[in-house]
Amino acid sequence: MQNDNTPSFLEAFIGSFVNFKKYPAYTKRSGLSSAAHYLLLVTLCCSLYAFATTSWLTTNISPYMDELAENTPTIKVVDGEAFVDIEQPYFVETEGTKIAVIDTTQKADIYLDEYKQIIVISKDRISSKDANGKIQAFKFSDIQNNFTLNSSTVAGWVEVVESWFLPGVFLLCFLWQVCWKAMQLFITAGVITLIQKSRPNFLVHLKLATLALCPAMAFGVLNYALGLFAFPIPAAAFIFWGILAGLTYYGSEQLRNTPEYG
């Protein structure tokens, strides 16, 4: 039961980012409040991750996707074979770099051997080679129906990808972070509990770790954004764990000096 002197949820949430000396007081809030604190933190940080990633996509990838859509000729696939009425080979380029080629008159291997990274549309399949040299191929005969691929079709795909990218990235990020960060909290709380010989107990250390996760994740978001648009911070993982474990231990030491745990 929380008394009138217990910090409010909003006070504890905002204070966890900046007011490290009050961590012991914030642990007086209930376990349910701590869980809500955790979920709100992960939601906010994943939103920032998604916005930063979408912004990077819009700036660096979307123009090339739009250009690719505009330059896509009409390709008809009938009975597992591709037909085009353009001069071949037909290359798709971005900033002078060939990223795809359409040639139904020759085998895809000719281009896969020549280029480090490329997509090849040949007579009976679409093949791709990534920067690591891995080659994948999909035969048109695996599709039961005939179809036509043109600029409008690709533009529609690009529009769908761009419109769903933000919520898609957020959902994937949230599902990953909500599990991974929980594991990090349990690891941190467990280790500090052992170091402190269960004074305070594991639950209190878990609350402290949840509070410490706020500045740690804020640092993580900053490092991610810098990595996308400028340069990542060296040894970022060690700094993250240092913030998380260091502030958890700092709060624990404050509690050990109180009459309740002294």
Image (cartoon, grey):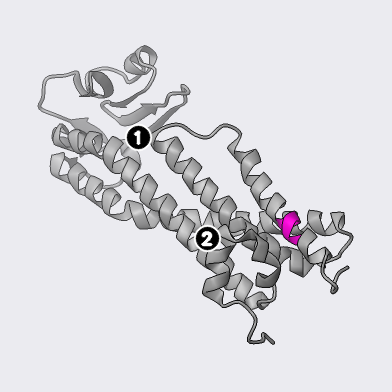
Give the structural element (helix, strand or loop) at label 1.
Answer: strand
Question: How many neighbours does mark 1 have within 10 angstroms: few (below 14), some (14-19), or many (20 or more)?
Answer: some
- In terms of secondary structure, what is the magenta stretch mainly? helix
Q: Position of residue 196 (x, y in %)?
A: 86, 58
Camera-side residue of 99 and 231 = 231
Could one spot residue 61 in this view of the protein? Answer: no
Image quadrant assignment for residue 262: bottom right
Type of the residue with mark 2: Val
Could one spot residue 251 in this view of the protein? Answer: yes
Q: Residue at x 35, y 41 (%)?
A: 142
Question: How many neighbours does mark 2 have within 10 angstroms: few (below 14), some (14-19), or many (20 or more)?
Answer: many
Q: Residue at x 14, y 39 (%)?
A: 151
In the image, is 177 to the left or to the right of 51? right
Q: Which label belongs to residue 19?
A: none
State the count of labels. Answer: 2
Q: Position of residue 251 (x, y in %)?
A: 73, 60
Type of the residue with mark 1: Lys
Camera-side residue of 144 and 86 = 86
Q: What is the spatial separation of the Cα atoms under label 2 and label 1, in whole angstroms?
A: 42 Å
Q: Residue at x 35, y 15 (%)?
A: 115
In the image, is 138 to the left or to the right of 81? right
Q: Position of residue 3 (x, y in %)?
A: 67, 86
Is 41 located above or below residue 166 in the figure? Answer: below
Give the structural element (helix, strand or loop) at label 2.
Answer: helix
Camera-side residue of 80 and 177 = 177
Q: Residue at x 63, y 86 (%)?
A: 4
**Range drawn in magenta:** 248-252
Question: Which residue carries the number 2 mark?
Answer: 42
Question: Which residue carries the number 1 mark?
Answer: 139
Q: Would you say residue 7 sits in the magenta stretch?
A: no
